[in-house]
Amino acid sequence: TGRFLAHSIAHPLAQRRATAVTSRSGDAIRLSGVSLHNLQRLNVAVPLNRLVCVTGVSGSGKSTLVRQVLRENLAHLVARRRGRAALQGCEAIDGWQAIRRVLEVDQTPIGKTPRSSPATYLGIWDDIRAVYAQTEEARVRGYKANRFSFNVGGGRCAACEGQGIKTIEMSFLPNVKVPCEVCNGARFNRETLDVLYKGKSIGDVLAMNVDAAVEFFHAHAKVRHALSLLRDVGLGYLTLGQQSPTLSGGEAQRLKLVTELAKVKPGVENKNAALYLLDEPTVGLHMGDVEKLIVVLQRLVDAGNSVVVIEHNLDVIAEADWIIDMGPEGGEKGGKVVAAGAPEKIAKAKTHTGRALAAFLSR
């Protein structure tokens, strides 16, 4: 039952994951009487525990359905856990009770200051600080975990206040950022950097890339698990201390998704199932990054979550479990569900998406 991503050479994701048939396989969020903008009193079922792709030409009503009707109403219902509430753009929504959280994941930066980094965003920096606080040298000196924080005084470099960089104002030109001349970008003072774990200082860890850190923290399960997820989605080249504003939109998006994956414990039922919404997440991504994004989305579904993606990229569409095709055209000639089903079914439909997908899969 493999599905193929149609490139000119064998594709790493050529064999599609098999979707397990579970007791929840029939669950779906059902929207009735959807009427907003050009949507024409639709009745739509969005399967849960699946990767669902909403497709169609521009102006066909995709964003209205997903963002303005599905997201807005579910966010309100899930937050208040009440079935009776004023609904926007539809008459009724059923099946939403299985969802515990609703999150829209976009490519906006994960942080705007140099103090934000992959390690802090993943929530593992506190665990790493605890590792250094437990070393013999730290105990002898009386250092606690806060000594290894670059956000408070005591252990951080006083010259740059733990940022590792200094900003030089250039009057009429853009400001220039240069490494701190005191700590050379290490963020900590000399006394803090004297404390070593496995021969590395806390500053060395910040400069370490994810691939190396997975092995370095092999004995620390939580840290290793989060870093392994980053490596698996192709972000092994990032350093733990890389400043968040320097991450690309695609990197930031994958980091957000990995943060969600890290919350799921292997072998433990996910009792906090979420619905993730993404609006054209492949915009600006290289083909190789699209592959890695698909892997993350599939792993989120495998962990018991639901994913709804608005997308034109045929790589993503071909890998979906279910497709909701909007159309048949845009504007006043759109606003209808012209086809719904697995990609193989959509490829047989006489719609714009169906014809494009059929040609794509035939290659």
Image: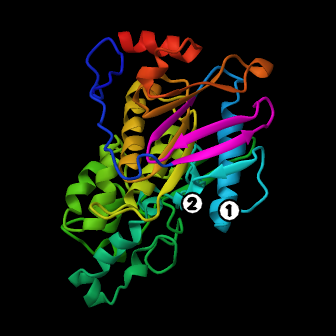
Q: Nearer the viewer, residue 149 or 282?
A: 282
* Element class at badge 1: loop
Can residue 151 be seen here? The reply is yes
Residue 303 magenta: no
* Residue at image coords 65%, 65%: 79
Q: Is residue 257 above or below residue 131?
A: above
- Residue that label 1 marks: 83
x then y, percent, for residue 130: 33, 77
The span from disc 2 to disc 1 (Cα, nearest Å) is 8 Å
* Residue at image coords 20%, 62%: 218
28 to the left or right of 174: left
Q: Quadrant of the N terminus?
A: top left
Q: Amino acid at mark 2?
A: Gln
x then y, percent, for residue 117: 47, 57
Q: Quadrant of residue 203?
A: bottom left
Q: Is residue 137 above or below residue 300?
A: below
* Residue at image coords 40%, 30%: 319
- Residue that label 2 marks: 97
Q: Nearer the viewer, residue 13 or 292?
A: 13
Magenta range is: 28-54
User: How would you rate the neighbour count of disc 2 (Cα within 10 Å): few for under 14, some for 14-19, many for 20 or more?
Assistant: some
Residue 31 magenta: yes
Q: Is residue 275 above or below residue 195?
A: above
Are the residues at dot 2 and dot 1 in contact (C-beta closer than 8 Å)?
A: yes
* Element class at badge 2: helix
**Label annotation for residue 218:** none
x then y, percent, for residue 101: 55, 59
71 to the left or right of 145: right
